[in-house]
Image: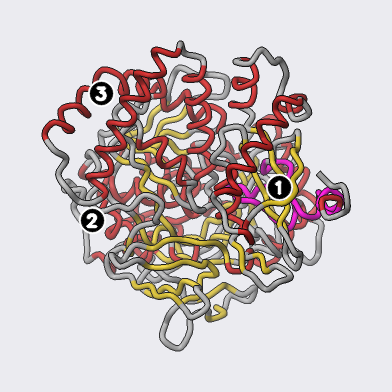
Amino acid sequence: MTTILRLPTEPDQLTLPALLLRNAEDHGGLPALSWRAAGDDVEWTTLTWQEVRRETAVLAAGYAALGVERGEQVLMMMGNRPEHWLSDLALTHLGAVPVTVYGTAAPGQIAHIARHSRARFAVIEGARERERWEPLLADATAPLEKLVVVDPDEAGPHPAYALVHATGARLHRADAFDKAWRESRADDPLTVVYTSGTTGDPKAVPITHRSVVVNALALDRVVDLPDHVEHICYLPFAHIAERMLGIYLPVFRASHVHLCADTAAVAATAGALRPAQFFGVPRVWEKLAATVRAALAGLPAPQQAVIEAAAVTAREHVSYRERGEEPPAVLEAAYRRAKAEVLDPILALAGFDRLVWTASASAPMPLDVVRFWAGFGIVVMDAWGLTETVGVFTTNSPSAFRLGSVGRPLEGLELRIAEDGEILVRGGTVFAGYLRADGTVDGALDADGFFPTGDIGRIDGDGYLWLTDRKKEMIITSTGKNVSPALVENTLKEHPLIGQALVHGDGRSYLVALLVLDPELAPAWAAARGIDGSPATLAGHPAVREEIARAVEAANARLNRTEQIKRYRLLSQEWGPETGELTPSLKLRRRVIREQYGEVLDALYEEGGS
């Protein structure tokens, strides 16, 4: 628990601006926000908490001069850059509601959000965003009036961010700034998050200051972090996870945010910063594990044997902790020796040797990935929650965890399992309902105040929640058997060559799958066997195809008959948000993939399909 923080009023009355003032007064000289200029991979620019509040006040005056009013939504489409982070706080201080739109959103999705939110203003990054947003200025069905463009060379006829800042610097008055934010109340909306939309149009989830603070307090009770801890901020701010981890929790904890605009630079950033905490959605942990595995595969056999022996010791040590038992003195000594002499030097190469808190959420974590990191003494604390619960609802903690589960509810929150296995939740962080276009709320809670999450799971005897799948994604075969596609997909992905998988078979008599080679491990695996080629060409190589066949056979051996894959197709192209197969939070868009590969899937059910 954080022990250095003064709460300026009762917790249930706190607002984000009150916490920012506290930071400026109590921790004003400490670093708050750091970023690197485009093209600079060495030097960081840093603002202290005093400077952050000063910049927030200037920008608030600038946006007020532009015409932004209390209570209205202001849309933003930018990467993880300081203009985004600071604008978010500035709009909040005006009493406006900042809303981030995913940078990968299609024009139709942008139009839906613009109309639904009734936003008059949008702050966007540059030319790429202008192409998608400008048509809305002439669209009579959308109330959009002005675009603010951050990149000055791309502003064209629109006001530039620099102009908003300059206007704010000229017009800022401390008394007006103070008056505006003090009018905000804990029950006021802090943001609206539009769900990423794996199916259908995104829904608007209103999130209040109070629900964010309640969630932050509950998380602080189970997460023991160093004071002013650093956070690598790289996930989209349109996702509730990064909103909490990259904006709201840092303000609550007076911690230090490092913005990482390029997700490809996350590993290098971690290597340079050696953070104490790191959060990644399952796909991030999978890719990091694949990178480490590929590097280890290139080492001489004797070194690999030493590392594997150290990993066995680490996993045994983790097992004792998982059971809540004190490791025997001999094991404790062996583990400390293995960490110091073998494991930490490897982790140091990735900047992970100082980690005290590692976490994942958003989707079930493949158990083999969890066990891989446990072999380095890193327990990835899987958590679970939704946008509708302000992110984390259940979590594992260093003092109480079960590998493969998503932990137990945070303090003050309740969950139960419905007869059909659906997880129901209730508590102070659960929203009341979805925001309608007219500003009213469409109630989403049942008569007892529980929200049906759409996730399927079970609670074990110790109160840990285990996820099965999304209710709408469960496959029901033609024989009436229910199958969790995520369970089958994660089993397939336990083989290092398989980076992505989609299982299909709703209404069919058996399951088929689309498989994608891991882009990091596949070339390393091939090179070790004297095979050249990229993942695209390796997908057709006989040796690779034989290994994939063995991987599917091994997975089937661990699955029941209904869950087994009868046929599959190995694809040459990795799926991603840019090509539409993944959401921005790296979850499968199953409908999109099924439509895109419809002919391939149909062929797998035809005689002779492979």
Horizontal arrangement in the rendering, residue 32 relative to residue 121 (left or right): left
Counting residues from the start of the chain, the first of labels 3 and 2 encountered is 2
Looking at the rendered structure, which numbered label has been put on residue 581? 1
Residue 308, x across and y down, in percent: 37, 25
Residue 38, x across and y down, in percent: 57, 24
Q: Which residues are magenta?
A: 576-602
Horizontal arrangement in the rendering, residue 57 relative to residue 157 (left or right): left
Query: As displayed, is residue 152 above or below residue 137?
Result: above
Per the image, label 2 sits on a secondary structure element best described as: helix
Horizontal arrangement in the rendering, residue 102 relative to residue 178 (left or right): right
Q: Residues within 10 Å of mark 3 (few under 14, many from 20)?
A: many
- The amino acid beneath tag 2 is Arg
Does the image show residue 32? no
Residues under numbered marks 3 and 1 in contact, where contact means CB atoms less than 8 Å apart: no
Does the image show residue 93? yes
- The amino acid beneath tag 1 is Glu
Residue 436, x across and y down, in percent: 61, 75
Identify which residue, 364 or 93, lies in the foreground.
364
Q: Which residue is the site of mark 2? A: 221
Check the picture and name the quadrant holding the C terminus.
top right
Residue plotted at (52% across, 66% down): 455
| Residue 270 inside the magenta-drawn segment | no
The answer to which image quadrant residue 180 occupies is bottom left
Identify which residue, 603 or 43, lies in the foreground.
603
Residues under numbered marks 3 and 2 in contact, where contact means CB atoms less than 8 Å apart: no
Looking at the rendered structure, which numbered label has been put on residue 338? 3
- The amino acid beneath tag 3 is Ala
Counting residues from the start of the chain, the first of labels 1 and 2 encountered is 2
- Marks 3 and 2 sit apart, C-alpha to C-alpha, by 31 Å
Colour pattern: secondary structure
Residue plotted at (63% across, 50% down): 583
- Marks 1 and 2 sit apart, C-alpha to C-alpha, by 37 Å
